[in-house]
């Protein structure tokens, strides 16, 4: 039980640091999008669980705590920041990020946790709304609207 509690605390600190990185006030939109995308990748990769003295010698990678919902959240931040950029490729990059966020926020929500479906639905709707407003990718925007 102590290992599980330590892993949970490690995951909390991990995501707290990522939130701080994204919320730095001096970042321009492009930099904020890049930092948020890096945070999303880190959430998908995850952090190692605590394993005191449990080395099995098999050489297999240790289990990791992954945070796909946090990854979706950071992807949405990256998409919104990128949609405010004025560069030539910003519209396409924003569309790609909105698509990634909508995939990370699956259609079915959390099967094991019915209490948080409201928050999930709100964030998925935000991702789809952002995607539907992208002028650079009309077929994807129309599909998101449906």
Image (cartoon, rainbow, N blue to C red):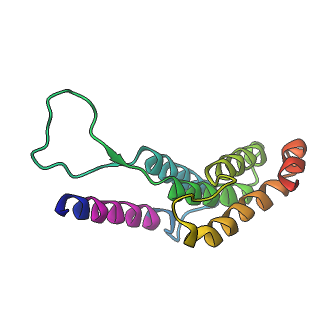
| Furthest-left residue in this view | 53
Magenta stretch prevailing secondary structure: helix
Q: Estimate the x, y position of residue 41 in percent, counting from the top left.
A: 49, 46
Q: Estimate the x, y position of residue 37 in percent, counting from the top left.
A: 55, 50
Q: Which of 95 and 140 is in front in this view?
A: 140
Q: Which of 138 and 82 is in front in this view?
A: 138
How many marks the image carries: the answer is 0
> Image check: 59 left or right of 25?
left
Magenta-colored stretch includes residue 14? yes
Q: Which residue is drawn at 90% across and 45% down?
A: 138
Q: Residue at x 57, y 68 (%)?
A: 114
Q: Quadrant of residue 29?
A: bottom right
Q: Estimate the x, y position of residue 48 in percent, counting from the top left.
A: 29, 47
Q: Residue at x 52, y 65 (%)?
A: 113
> Image check: 19 left or right of 114?
left
> Image check: 7 left or right of 127?
left
Region rendered in magenta: 7-20
Q: Nearer the viewer, residue 3 or 69?
A: 3
Q: Estimate the x, y position of residue 106 in percent, counting from the top left.
A: 65, 52
Placement of 55 over or under 52, stated as above or below: above
> Image check: 68 left or right of 120?
left
């Amino acid at each position: 039980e102590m290992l599980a509690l330590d892993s949970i605390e490690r995951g909390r600190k991990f995501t707290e640091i990522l939130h701080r990185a994204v919320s730095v006030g001096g970042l321009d939109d492009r930099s904020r999008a890049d930092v948020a995308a890096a945070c999303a990748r880190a959430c998908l990769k995850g952090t190692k669980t605590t394993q005191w003295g449990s080395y099995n010698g098999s050489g297999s990678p240790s289990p990791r705590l992954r945070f796909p919902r946090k990854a979706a959240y950071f992807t949405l931040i990256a998409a919104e920041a990128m949609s405010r950029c004025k560069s030539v490729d910003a519209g396409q990059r924003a569309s790609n990020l909105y698509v990634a966020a909508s995939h990370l926020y699956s259609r079915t929500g959390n099967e094991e946790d019915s209490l948080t479906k409201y928050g999930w639905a709100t964030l998925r709707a935000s991702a789809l709304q952002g995607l539907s407003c992208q002028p650079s990718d009309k077929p994807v925007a129309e599909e998101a609207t449906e």
